Amino acid sequence: MPYIMVDVEADGPIPGDYSMICFGAIVVEPALNRTFYGQLRPISDAYRPDALAVSGFTREQCLAFDEPQAVMAAFER
């Protein structure tokens, strides 16, 4: 059974109060060719500039990302 590794970037330290803005995933198997990357529009007006800076994105860029529901549905497929 393969594992799935996921890396998440967020704009703050607390889920729900802040937003996951992007994530990547890979199925851990010899080929390492099944991957996913998604960018999600924030679900909250709250954000911490220091946390957002880690991602390399600006707040304006994040506000133009895709709707979270659509990104998560694509990941599920």
Image (tube, grey):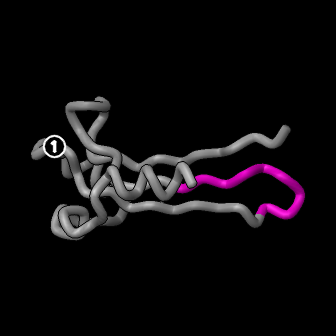
For the point 66% across and 45% down, which residue is it? Answer: 5
Q: Which x, y percent locates residue 51?
A: 29, 47
Q: Nearer the viewer, residue 1 or 9?
A: 1
Outermost residue on the right side: it is: 30
The residue at which mark 1 appears reads as: 44
For the point 76% across and 66% down, which residue is it? Answer: 33
- Three-letter amino acid code of the residue under disc 1: Ser
Q: Quadrant of residue 62?
A: bottom left
- Is 3 left or right of 75, judged from the image as shown? right
Q: Nearer the viewer, residue 64 or 18?
A: 64
Q: Is residue 5 magenta?
A: no
For the point 25% across and 57% down, which residue is it? Answer: 41
- Is 5 left or right of 23, judged from the image as shown? right
Per the image, label 1 sits on a secondary structure element best described as loop
- Is 3 left or right of 67, judged from the image as shown? right
- Is 5 left or right of 75, judged from the image as shown? right
Q: Quadrant of residue 26?
A: bottom right
Q: Nearer the viewer, residue 67 or 15?
A: 67
Q: Which residues are magenta?
A: 24-32
Q: Which x, y percent locates residue 66?
A: 30, 64
Determine whether 14 is above or below 46 in the image: above
Check the picture and name the quadrant holding the C terminus: bottom right
